[in-house]
Image (cartoon, helix red, strand yellow):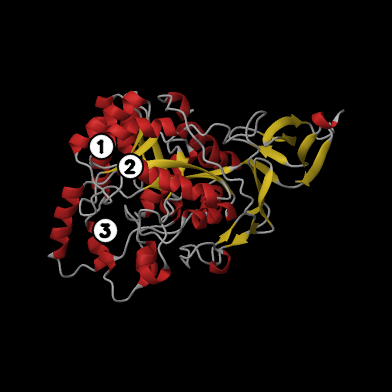
Amino acid sequence: MSDSEEFDLVIEGGTVIDEHNERALDVYVRNGQIAALTEPNERLAARHTLEARGLAVLPGMIDAHTHFRTWSKHSDTFGEMSDAAAAGGITTVAGFVMGMNAEGTTLASRVRECLAEASSTSPIDFAFHAAIADEEHTLDELSEMIDLGVTSFKMFMINRARRMMVDDGFLLTAMKRISDLGGLPMVHAELEDLSMALAAEARTDRELTSVQRFVAARPTWLEAEATRRAIQVAKQADVPLYVVHVTCEDALNEIRRARQQGLTVFAETCPQYLSLTDDAMSRQGGLVKVAPPLRSERDRQTLVDAVLNGEIDVVSSDHAPYTRQVKTDATTDFLDIPVGMPGTQTLVGVTWKVLSEAGGSPHDLVRVLAATPARVFGLTGKGRIDVGSDADITLVDFTDTTTVSVDDLHGPAGYSAYEGWRLPLRIVETLQRGESVLKNDAVRTNDVGRFISREPHRGGTEARR
Protein backbone atom coordinates (compact mmCIF):
# COMPACT_ATOMS: atom_id res chain seq x y z
CA MET A 1 0.00 0.00 0.00
CA SER A 2 1.42 3.39 -0.98
CA ASP A 3 1.52 6.41 1.27
CA SER A 4 -1.26 7.97 -0.80
CA GLU A 5 -3.53 5.06 0.13
CA GLU A 6 -2.66 5.15 3.82
CA PHE A 7 -5.33 6.49 6.18
CA ASP A 8 -4.64 9.46 8.43
CA LEU A 9 -6.24 7.93 11.51
CA VAL A 10 -7.96 4.81 12.77
CA ILE A 11 -10.31 4.88 15.77
CA GLU A 12 -9.82 1.36 16.95
CA GLY A 13 -11.70 -1.02 19.23
CA GLY A 14 -14.80 1.04 19.97
CA THR A 15 -18.51 0.38 19.53
CA VAL A 16 -20.03 2.51 16.80
CA ILE A 17 -23.55 3.61 17.76
CA ASP A 18 -25.99 5.34 15.44
CA GLU A 19 -29.73 6.00 15.82
CA HIS A 20 -30.60 2.40 14.93
CA ASN A 21 -27.63 0.06 15.40
CA GLU A 22 -24.44 -0.58 17.32
CA ARG A 23 -21.48 -2.58 16.08
CA ALA A 24 -17.86 -3.16 16.95
CA LEU A 25 -16.15 -1.34 14.08
CA ASP A 26 -12.89 0.43 13.41
CA VAL A 27 -13.31 3.88 11.87
CA TYR A 28 -10.73 5.05 9.34
CA VAL A 29 -10.29 8.73 8.53
CA ARG A 30 -8.74 10.38 5.51
CA ASN A 31 -8.76 14.10 4.68
CA GLY A 32 -11.23 14.84 7.45
CA GLN A 33 -13.83 12.34 6.32
CA ILE A 34 -14.74 8.82 7.29
CA ALA A 35 -13.10 6.75 4.57
CA ALA A 36 -13.70 3.17 5.76
CA LEU A 37 -15.54 1.17 8.41
CA THR A 38 -14.12 -2.29 9.04
CA GLU A 39 -14.52 -5.27 11.33
CA PRO A 40 -12.07 -5.17 14.26
CA ASN A 41 -9.83 -7.90 12.86
CA GLU A 42 -9.40 -6.24 9.47
CA ARG A 43 -6.35 -4.09 9.97
CA LEU A 44 -5.55 -1.35 7.44
CA ALA A 45 -2.56 0.97 7.38
CA ALA A 46 -3.02 4.28 9.22
CA ARG A 47 -0.55 6.92 10.36
CA HIS A 48 -2.17 7.37 13.75
CA THR A 49 -4.24 5.16 16.04
CA LEU A 50 -6.79 6.33 18.59
CA GLU A 51 -7.58 3.56 21.06
CA ALA A 52 -11.32 3.47 21.80
CA ARG A 53 -11.64 0.08 23.50
CA GLY A 54 -14.54 0.10 25.93
CA LEU A 55 -15.90 3.36 24.51
CA ALA A 56 -18.97 4.28 22.49
CA VAL A 57 -18.13 5.93 19.18
CA LEU A 58 -20.97 8.37 18.51
CA PRO A 59 -21.51 10.83 15.66
CA GLY A 60 -20.42 14.29 16.73
CA MET A 61 -23.16 15.80 18.86
CA ILE A 62 -25.07 18.83 17.58
CA ASP A 63 -26.51 21.71 19.60
CA ALA A 64 -29.10 23.21 17.25
CA HIS A 65 -30.21 26.14 19.46
CA THR A 66 -27.70 28.51 21.09
CA HIS A 67 -27.41 32.22 21.84
CA PHE A 68 -24.35 34.43 22.25
CA ARG A 69 -23.49 38.03 23.04
CA THR A 70 -23.35 39.64 19.58
CA TRP A 71 -26.52 41.71 19.06
CA SER A 72 -27.85 40.56 22.44
CA LYS A 73 -27.13 40.97 26.16
CA HIS A 74 -26.00 37.41 26.77
CA SER A 75 -22.75 36.92 28.62
CA ASP A 76 -20.92 34.59 26.17
CA THR A 77 -19.09 35.64 23.05
CA PHE A 78 -19.47 33.19 20.18
CA GLY A 79 -16.03 31.80 20.97
CA GLU A 80 -16.88 31.29 24.64
CA MET A 81 -20.17 29.61 23.75
CA SER A 82 -18.55 27.25 21.25
CA ASP A 83 -15.73 26.45 23.69
CA ALA A 84 -18.37 25.41 26.23
CA ALA A 85 -20.11 23.31 23.59
CA ALA A 86 -16.87 21.60 22.66
CA ALA A 87 -16.17 20.86 26.31
CA GLY A 88 -19.52 19.06 26.45
CA GLY A 89 -18.89 16.80 23.45
CA ILE A 90 -20.54 19.01 20.82
CA THR A 91 -18.95 19.22 17.36
CA THR A 92 -21.50 21.49 15.65
CA VAL A 93 -23.45 24.44 17.05
CA ALA A 94 -26.21 26.46 15.43
CA GLY A 95 -26.43 29.98 16.80
CA PHE A 96 -29.19 32.56 16.52
CA VAL A 97 -28.29 35.89 14.96
CA MET A 98 -30.36 38.37 16.95
CA GLY A 99 -30.49 42.18 16.97
CA MET A 100 -33.72 42.72 15.08
CA ASN A 101 -34.38 46.43 14.55
CA ALA A 102 -30.95 47.36 15.94
CA GLU A 103 -30.18 50.87 14.74
CA GLY A 104 -27.87 51.10 11.76
CA THR A 105 -28.02 47.40 10.92
CA THR A 106 -29.75 45.09 8.49
CA LEU A 107 -30.39 41.38 8.66
CA ALA A 108 -27.55 40.80 6.21
CA SER A 109 -25.08 42.99 8.07
CA ARG A 110 -25.80 41.25 11.38
CA VAL A 111 -25.41 37.79 9.88
CA ARG A 112 -22.14 38.73 8.19
CA GLU A 113 -20.75 40.21 11.40
CA CYS A 114 -21.57 37.04 13.32
CA LEU A 115 -20.07 34.93 10.55
CA ALA A 116 -16.82 36.87 10.71
CA GLU A 117 -16.69 36.58 14.50
CA ALA A 118 -17.41 32.87 14.60
CA SER A 119 -14.97 32.10 11.80
CA SER A 120 -12.11 33.49 13.86
CA THR A 121 -13.08 32.12 17.28
CA SER A 122 -14.95 28.80 17.07
CA PRO A 123 -13.09 25.53 17.69
CA ILE A 124 -16.01 23.58 16.22
CA ASP A 125 -18.22 23.78 13.14
CA PHE A 126 -21.14 26.17 13.20
CA ALA A 127 -24.28 27.23 11.37
CA PHE A 128 -26.67 30.12 11.86
CA HIS A 129 -30.38 30.69 12.21
CA ALA A 130 -31.51 34.26 11.53
CA ALA A 131 -34.06 35.82 13.87
CA ILE A 132 -36.27 38.18 11.90
CA ALA A 133 -38.83 40.84 12.66
CA ASP A 134 -40.84 43.42 10.74
CA GLU A 135 -38.05 45.81 9.79
CA GLU A 136 -37.44 47.51 6.46
CA HIS A 137 -35.98 45.31 3.72
CA THR A 138 -35.83 42.13 5.83
CA LEU A 139 -38.07 40.10 3.57
CA ASP A 140 -36.09 41.30 0.56
CA GLU A 141 -32.89 40.07 2.23
CA LEU A 142 -34.11 36.51 2.79
CA SER A 143 -32.94 35.33 -0.64
CA GLU A 144 -29.47 36.71 0.13
CA MET A 145 -29.47 34.71 3.36
CA ILE A 146 -30.42 31.55 1.49
CA ASP A 147 -27.56 32.15 -0.96
CA LEU A 148 -25.22 32.61 2.00
CA GLY A 149 -26.30 29.27 3.45
CA VAL A 150 -28.54 30.53 6.27
CA THR A 151 -31.83 28.76 5.58
CA SER A 152 -33.76 28.85 8.88
CA PHE A 153 -35.57 31.91 10.22
CA LYS A 154 -36.94 32.40 13.72
CA MET A 155 -39.89 34.60 14.57
CA PHE A 156 -41.02 35.59 18.06
CA MET A 157 -44.75 35.78 18.75
CA ILE A 158 -44.01 37.68 21.98
CA ASN A 159 -41.66 40.49 23.20
CA ARG A 160 -43.14 43.58 21.52
CA ALA A 161 -41.35 45.96 23.90
CA ARG A 162 -37.98 44.64 22.73
CA ARG A 163 -39.04 45.04 19.07
CA MET A 164 -38.66 41.31 18.52
CA MET A 165 -42.30 40.30 18.12
CA VAL A 166 -44.01 39.79 14.77
CA ASP A 167 -47.74 40.12 14.26
CA ASP A 168 -49.92 37.59 12.45
CA GLY A 169 -49.77 39.47 9.18
CA PHE A 170 -45.99 39.52 9.09
CA LEU A 171 -45.91 35.87 10.18
CA LEU A 172 -47.99 34.88 7.16
CA THR A 173 -46.14 37.08 4.68
CA ALA A 174 -42.74 35.93 5.95
CA MET A 175 -43.70 32.25 5.92
CA LYS A 176 -44.92 32.52 2.32
CA ARG A 177 -41.64 34.14 1.32
CA ILE A 178 -39.62 31.52 3.23
CA SER A 179 -41.67 28.80 1.55
CA ASP A 180 -40.91 30.20 -1.90
CA LEU A 181 -37.19 30.20 -1.09
CA GLY A 182 -37.10 26.71 0.40
CA GLY A 183 -36.30 27.95 3.89
CA LEU A 184 -37.55 26.71 7.25
CA PRO A 185 -39.54 29.02 9.56
CA MET A 186 -39.10 28.64 13.31
CA VAL A 187 -41.35 30.12 15.99
CA HIS A 188 -41.13 31.02 19.64
CA ALA A 189 -44.73 30.18 20.48
CA GLU A 190 -46.20 32.52 23.10
CA LEU A 191 -48.76 35.28 22.50
CA GLU A 192 -47.91 38.83 23.50
CA ASP A 193 -51.31 40.46 23.98
CA LEU A 194 -52.79 37.61 25.99
CA SER A 195 -49.63 37.39 28.09
CA MET A 196 -49.78 41.10 28.83
CA ALA A 197 -53.44 40.81 29.85
CA LEU A 198 -52.65 37.90 32.15
CA ALA A 199 -49.71 39.79 33.63
CA ALA A 200 -51.92 42.80 34.38
CA GLU A 201 -54.45 40.52 36.04
CA ALA A 202 -51.75 38.85 38.13
CA ARG A 203 -50.45 42.21 39.35
CA THR A 204 -53.79 42.87 41.05
CA ASP A 205 -53.43 39.74 43.21
CA ARG A 206 -51.30 40.89 46.14
CA GLU A 207 -50.92 37.35 47.43
CA LEU A 208 -48.90 36.24 44.41
CA THR A 209 -45.10 36.34 44.49
CA SER A 210 -43.12 37.70 41.56
CA VAL A 211 -42.33 34.14 40.51
CA GLN A 212 -46.02 33.25 40.52
CA ARG A 213 -46.87 36.37 38.52
CA PHE A 214 -44.31 35.41 35.87
CA VAL A 215 -45.74 31.91 35.59
CA ALA A 216 -49.33 33.19 35.57
CA ALA A 217 -48.59 35.44 32.59
CA ARG A 218 -47.21 32.55 30.50
CA PRO A 219 -49.42 29.48 31.10
CA THR A 220 -49.36 26.28 29.07
CA TRP A 221 -52.59 27.10 27.24
CA LEU A 222 -50.99 30.31 25.96
CA GLU A 223 -48.09 28.37 24.47
CA ALA A 224 -50.54 25.87 23.00
CA GLU A 225 -52.65 28.58 21.37
CA ALA A 226 -49.57 30.22 19.89
CA THR A 227 -48.43 26.84 18.58
CA ARG A 228 -51.85 26.21 17.02
CA ARG A 229 -51.85 29.63 15.36
CA ALA A 230 -48.34 29.23 13.97
CA ILE A 231 -49.25 25.82 12.56
CA GLN A 232 -52.31 27.24 10.80
CA VAL A 233 -50.25 30.06 9.29
CA ALA A 234 -47.61 27.57 8.12
CA LYS A 235 -50.37 25.46 6.58
CA GLN A 236 -51.60 28.46 4.59
CA ALA A 237 -48.03 29.24 3.52
CA ASP A 238 -47.46 25.60 2.53
CA VAL A 239 -44.21 25.34 4.47
CA PRO A 240 -42.85 23.00 7.17
CA LEU A 241 -42.65 24.54 10.64
CA TYR A 242 -40.11 24.16 13.44
CA VAL A 243 -41.40 24.91 16.96
CA VAL A 244 -38.57 25.76 19.35
CA HIS A 245 -38.44 24.73 23.02
CA VAL A 246 -41.80 22.94 23.38
CA THR A 247 -42.43 22.85 27.12
CA CYS A 248 -45.79 21.22 27.78
CA GLU A 249 -48.38 18.62 26.89
CA ASP A 250 -50.85 21.27 25.70
CA ALA A 251 -48.48 22.53 23.00
CA LEU A 252 -47.40 19.02 22.06
CA ASN A 253 -51.04 18.08 21.53
CA GLU A 254 -51.37 20.83 18.92
CA ILE A 255 -48.35 19.42 17.09
CA ARG A 256 -49.85 15.93 17.26
CA ARG A 257 -53.09 17.17 15.72
CA ALA A 258 -51.22 18.91 12.93
CA ARG A 259 -49.29 15.78 12.08
CA GLN A 260 -52.50 13.77 11.98
CA GLN A 261 -53.61 16.20 9.25
CA GLY A 262 -50.46 15.41 7.28
CA LEU A 263 -48.60 18.63 8.12
CA THR A 264 -44.85 18.67 8.70
CA VAL A 265 -44.14 20.18 12.11
CA PHE A 266 -40.82 19.67 13.85
CA ALA A 267 -40.78 19.77 17.65
CA GLU A 268 -37.80 20.74 19.76
CA THR A 269 -37.41 20.65 23.52
CA CYS A 270 -34.55 21.33 25.91
CA PRO A 271 -32.90 19.57 28.88
CA GLN A 272 -34.32 22.09 31.34
CA TYR A 273 -37.86 21.09 30.39
CA LEU A 274 -36.94 17.40 30.55
CA SER A 275 -35.18 17.58 33.91
CA LEU A 276 -36.55 20.51 35.95
CA THR A 277 -40.04 21.54 37.03
CA ASP A 278 -41.64 24.77 38.19
CA ASP A 279 -40.71 24.12 41.82
CA ALA A 280 -37.04 24.60 40.84
CA MET A 281 -37.74 28.35 40.72
CA SER A 282 -38.52 28.35 44.43
CA ARG A 283 -35.08 26.82 45.08
CA GLN A 284 -32.89 28.51 42.47
CA GLY A 285 -34.86 31.66 41.72
CA GLY A 286 -33.67 33.71 38.78
CA LEU A 287 -30.97 31.20 37.88
CA VAL A 288 -33.65 29.03 36.26
CA LYS A 289 -35.90 31.77 34.92
CA VAL A 290 -36.49 30.76 31.31
CA ALA A 291 -39.17 31.46 28.74
CA PRO A 292 -41.51 29.73 28.41
CA PRO A 293 -41.31 28.91 32.14
CA LEU A 294 -40.50 25.55 33.66
CA ARG A 295 -43.65 23.44 33.84
CA SER A 296 -45.28 20.74 35.97
CA GLU A 297 -44.04 17.23 36.63
CA ARG A 298 -46.78 15.91 34.33
CA ASP A 299 -45.53 18.12 31.50
CA ARG A 300 -41.94 17.07 32.16
CA GLN A 301 -42.82 13.38 32.01
CA THR A 302 -44.92 13.89 28.87
CA LEU A 303 -41.95 15.46 27.12
CA VAL A 304 -39.59 12.68 28.19
CA ASP A 305 -42.01 10.09 26.81
CA ALA A 306 -42.34 12.12 23.60
CA VAL A 307 -38.57 12.16 23.11
CA LEU A 308 -38.40 8.41 23.56
CA ASN A 309 -41.29 7.67 21.19
CA GLY A 310 -40.01 10.05 18.51
CA GLU A 311 -42.66 12.77 18.77
CA ILE A 312 -39.98 15.24 19.86
CA ASP A 313 -37.50 15.51 17.01
CA VAL A 314 -34.63 17.50 18.50
CA VAL A 315 -33.25 18.23 21.96
CA SER A 316 -31.08 21.34 22.13
CA SER A 317 -29.79 23.53 24.91
CA ASP A 318 -31.31 26.96 24.18
CA HIS A 319 -28.02 28.13 25.70
CA ALA A 320 -28.84 31.72 26.71
CA PRO A 321 -26.38 32.66 29.46
CA TYR A 322 -26.22 35.60 31.80
CA THR A 323 -23.84 35.91 34.72
CA ARG A 324 -24.78 34.67 38.17
CA GLN A 325 -24.66 38.28 39.37
CA VAL A 326 -27.26 39.37 36.81
CA LYS A 327 -29.52 36.39 37.53
CA THR A 328 -29.40 36.77 41.33
CA ASP A 329 -29.19 40.54 41.83
CA ALA A 330 -31.10 41.15 45.08
CA THR A 331 -32.09 44.65 43.93
CA THR A 332 -33.84 43.29 40.83
CA ASP A 333 -37.41 42.06 40.96
CA PHE A 334 -37.81 38.53 39.62
CA LEU A 335 -39.99 39.87 36.80
CA ASP A 336 -37.08 42.01 35.59
CA ILE A 337 -34.45 39.27 35.62
CA PRO A 338 -33.61 38.28 32.03
CA VAL A 339 -34.76 34.88 30.81
CA GLY A 340 -32.28 32.19 29.84
CA MET A 341 -29.62 29.95 31.33
CA PRO A 342 -26.34 28.35 30.25
CA GLY A 343 -26.68 24.81 28.99
CA THR A 344 -24.61 23.81 25.97
CA GLN A 345 -21.78 22.23 28.00
CA THR A 346 -24.23 20.06 29.96
CA LEU A 347 -26.57 19.29 27.03
CA VAL A 348 -25.31 15.77 26.29
CA GLY A 349 -24.88 14.69 29.91
CA VAL A 350 -28.19 15.98 31.25
CA THR A 351 -30.11 14.66 28.25
CA TRP A 352 -28.54 11.24 28.71
CA LYS A 353 -29.29 11.23 32.44
CA VAL A 354 -32.97 11.91 31.77
CA LEU A 355 -33.31 9.45 28.91
CA SER A 356 -31.35 6.63 30.53
CA GLU A 357 -33.35 6.91 33.76
CA ALA A 358 -36.53 6.64 31.66
CA GLY A 359 -35.34 3.49 29.91
CA GLY A 360 -33.84 5.15 26.84
CA SER A 361 -30.81 3.91 24.93
CA PRO A 362 -27.77 5.59 23.36
CA HIS A 363 -29.64 5.27 20.05
CA ASP A 364 -32.19 7.77 21.38
CA LEU A 365 -29.39 10.13 22.38
CA VAL A 366 -27.86 9.97 18.89
CA ARG A 367 -31.26 10.45 17.25
CA VAL A 368 -32.18 13.70 19.03
CA LEU A 369 -28.69 15.17 19.37
CA ALA A 370 -27.11 14.23 16.05
CA ALA A 371 -29.04 12.37 13.35
CA THR A 372 -32.32 14.29 13.34
CA PRO A 373 -30.93 17.81 13.79
CA ALA A 374 -28.55 17.13 10.92
CA ARG A 375 -31.47 16.05 8.70
CA VAL A 376 -33.86 18.81 9.75
CA PHE A 377 -31.36 21.63 9.24
CA GLY A 378 -29.51 20.21 6.25
CA LEU A 379 -26.16 19.89 8.01
CA THR A 380 -24.46 17.95 5.24
CA GLY A 381 -21.94 15.35 6.40
CA LYS A 382 -23.04 15.59 10.03
CA GLY A 383 -25.02 13.39 12.39
CA ARG A 384 -23.94 9.94 11.27
CA ILE A 385 -20.95 7.63 11.11
CA ASP A 386 -20.81 6.52 7.51
CA VAL A 387 -18.30 6.49 4.68
CA GLY A 388 -18.20 9.96 3.18
CA SER A 389 -19.44 11.74 6.30
CA ASP A 390 -17.28 14.23 8.17
CA ALA A 391 -15.13 12.52 10.77
CA ASP A 392 -16.96 14.29 13.61
CA ILE A 393 -16.83 11.83 16.50
CA THR A 394 -17.79 12.00 20.17
CA LEU A 395 -16.14 9.25 22.23
CA VAL A 396 -18.18 8.44 25.33
CA ASP A 397 -17.67 6.16 28.32
CA PHE A 398 -21.16 5.16 29.45
CA THR A 399 -19.71 3.23 32.41
CA ASP A 400 -18.21 6.35 34.00
CA THR A 401 -19.78 9.48 35.49
CA THR A 402 -19.25 13.24 35.45
CA THR A 403 -20.19 15.57 38.29
CA VAL A 404 -21.26 19.04 37.19
CA SER A 405 -19.06 21.64 38.85
CA VAL A 406 -18.81 25.35 38.23
CA ASP A 407 -15.02 24.92 38.32
CA ASP A 408 -15.19 22.93 35.08
CA LEU A 409 -17.58 25.18 33.18
CA HIS A 410 -16.51 27.41 30.31
CA GLY A 411 -17.78 30.94 29.85
CA PRO A 412 -18.44 33.85 32.21
CA ALA A 413 -21.89 32.78 33.51
CA GLY A 414 -20.33 31.26 36.61
CA TYR A 415 -23.09 28.79 37.42
CA SER A 416 -25.11 25.82 36.25
CA ALA A 417 -28.63 24.86 37.26
CA TYR A 418 -27.21 21.32 37.50
CA GLU A 419 -24.39 22.08 39.94
CA GLY A 420 -23.55 18.85 41.80
CA TRP A 421 -25.57 16.59 39.51
CA ARG A 422 -23.91 13.27 38.74
CA LEU A 423 -24.27 12.54 35.04
CA PRO A 424 -24.00 8.87 33.96
CA LEU A 425 -21.34 9.29 31.26
CA ARG A 426 -17.95 10.82 30.58
CA ILE A 427 -17.03 12.58 27.36
CA VAL A 428 -13.57 11.13 26.69
CA GLU A 429 -12.56 12.80 23.46
CA THR A 430 -14.15 14.74 20.62
CA LEU A 431 -12.94 14.90 17.04
CA GLN A 432 -13.77 17.49 14.39
CA ARG A 433 -13.04 16.09 10.93
CA GLY A 434 -10.52 13.74 12.54
CA GLU A 435 -8.78 16.44 14.60
CA SER A 436 -8.97 16.29 18.39
CA VAL A 437 -10.97 19.18 19.81
CA LEU A 438 -11.54 17.86 23.34
CA LYS A 439 -9.04 15.62 25.13
CA ASN A 440 -8.30 15.17 28.83
CA ASP A 441 -11.12 17.63 29.57
CA ALA A 442 -9.28 20.40 27.72
CA VAL A 443 -10.60 22.15 24.62
CA ARG A 444 -7.99 22.42 21.92
CA THR A 445 -8.51 25.47 19.74
CA ASN A 446 -7.10 24.11 16.50
CA ASP A 447 -8.80 26.59 14.18
CA VAL A 448 -10.73 23.71 12.69
CA GLY A 449 -14.19 25.22 13.13
CA ARG A 450 -15.90 26.01 9.83
CA PHE A 451 -19.14 27.64 8.75
CA ILE A 452 -21.66 25.14 7.40
CA SER A 453 -23.42 26.69 4.44
CA ARG A 454 -26.75 24.89 4.07
CA GLU A 455 -28.87 24.19 1.03
CA PRO A 456 -32.55 25.22 0.93
CA HIS A 457 -34.83 22.99 2.98
CA ARG A 458 -36.07 19.83 1.25
CA GLY A 459 -39.64 20.34 2.41
CA GLY A 460 -39.96 17.88 4.90
CA THR A 461 -41.29 14.61 5.75
CA GLU A 462 -38.10 12.69 5.06
CA ALA A 463 -36.44 14.62 7.90
CA ARG A 464 -39.00 13.15 10.35
CA ARG A 465 -37.90 9.54 9.86
**Disc ID at residue 402:** none
The quarter in which the N terminus is drawn is top right
Q: Which residue is mark 3?
A: 215
Disc 1 and disc 3: Cα gap in Å?
Answer: 36 Å
Which quadrant would residue 88 be assigned to in this image? bottom right
Q: Amino acid at mark 3?
A: Val
Residue 111 location, x and y as percent?
39, 43
Marks 3 & 2, CB-CB < 8 Å contact: no
Q: Amino acid at mark 1?
A: His
Disc 3 and disc 2: Cα gap in Å?
Answer: 32 Å
Q: Is residue 203 above or below residue 388?
A: below
Q: Which residue is mark 2?
A: 107
Residue sitting at x 32%, y 24%:
180
Sequence-wise, which precedes: disc 3 or disc 2? 2
Marks 1 & 2, CB-CB < 8 Å contact: yes
Which quadrant would residue 112 be assigned to in this image? top left
Taking the image as drawn, is residue 402 in sight?
Answer: yes
Residue 160 location, x and y as percent?
20, 50
Residue sitting at x 38%, y 26%:
182
Look at the numbered disc 2 and give the secondary structure of its residue.
Answer: helix
Look at the numbered disc 3 and give the secondary structure of its residue.
Answer: helix
